Amino acid sequence: MSDVHDAKQQQAEKRNLLSIFFITLLIGLGYQEMIPVVRESVRTNGLVLETFLLVGIFFFTSIRFFVGNQLHLLSPSLLKMPGLTWLYDLAVIIIQSVVLIFLGGVSAIEVNRKITIGFVDLLITLYVVDVMWIVSQWVIGKRKVSMGMGQLRDEFSVDSPCLHPVIKPAV
């Protein structure tokens, strides 16, 4: 039993290490995309309020997703679930991180004036993906609970020993 527990613990630690490294790398790429765009904007137009606001929104949004996604991937409840559940969550988090990379690349107002899919569009896409992920987790969780209810019904059937306790005489 201890060997099985140790193997699961090692698997969880590997998942944690992989997720921390990969998500940090993707968020770093988002900042790498943002810096040259904002630097060029500041060099050509000075510090414009709109660019300052876009950078601030990008910063706080990326921090929110970075911390939230890390905490989610490291949560004990997720680590107890099958590997496919963790992989599904990681895939969605990677999609969110890719959207954040593109969001970083359009964090200057001048860039947004020249393109068709701009900062606001990507920000909305990011939150739509997040809401769809939350809804899918709810649906998956509800399905698992309904499947588990069948097991509970079997445990508490009329013939179950739980409903027919053995009464021992007092000594």
Image (cartoon, grey):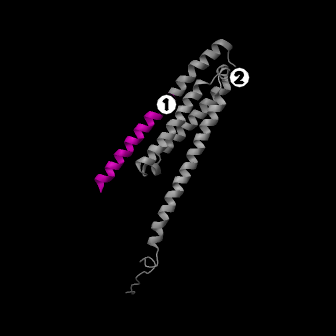
Closer-to-camera residue (135/161) = 135
Residue at 61% x, 36% y: name it: 125
Q: Quadrant of the N terminus?
A: bottom left
Residue 49 is situated, as x and y percent measured from the top left of the image, at: 71, 22
- Residue 136 shown in magenta: no
Left or right, residue 105 beside residue 157: right
Question: Which label is found at residue 26?
Answer: 1
Q: Is residue 26 magenta?
A: yes
Q: Residue at x 41, y 37 (%)?
A: 18
Tell me if residue 167 comes above or below residue 141 in the rendering. Answer: below
Secondary structure under tag 2 reads helix
Q: Which residues are magenta?
A: 1-28
- From the viewer's side, name the closer residue of 50 and 146: 146
In this rendering, position of residue 128 left or right of residue 3: right
Q: Which mark is residue 49?
A: 2
Residue drawn at (52%, 36%) of the image? 95
> The residue under label 1 is which amino acid type?
Leu
Residue found 44% across the figure and 43% down from its top:
87
Q: Tell me the distance, in whole angstroms, between the alpha carbons under discs 2 and 1.
A: 27 Å
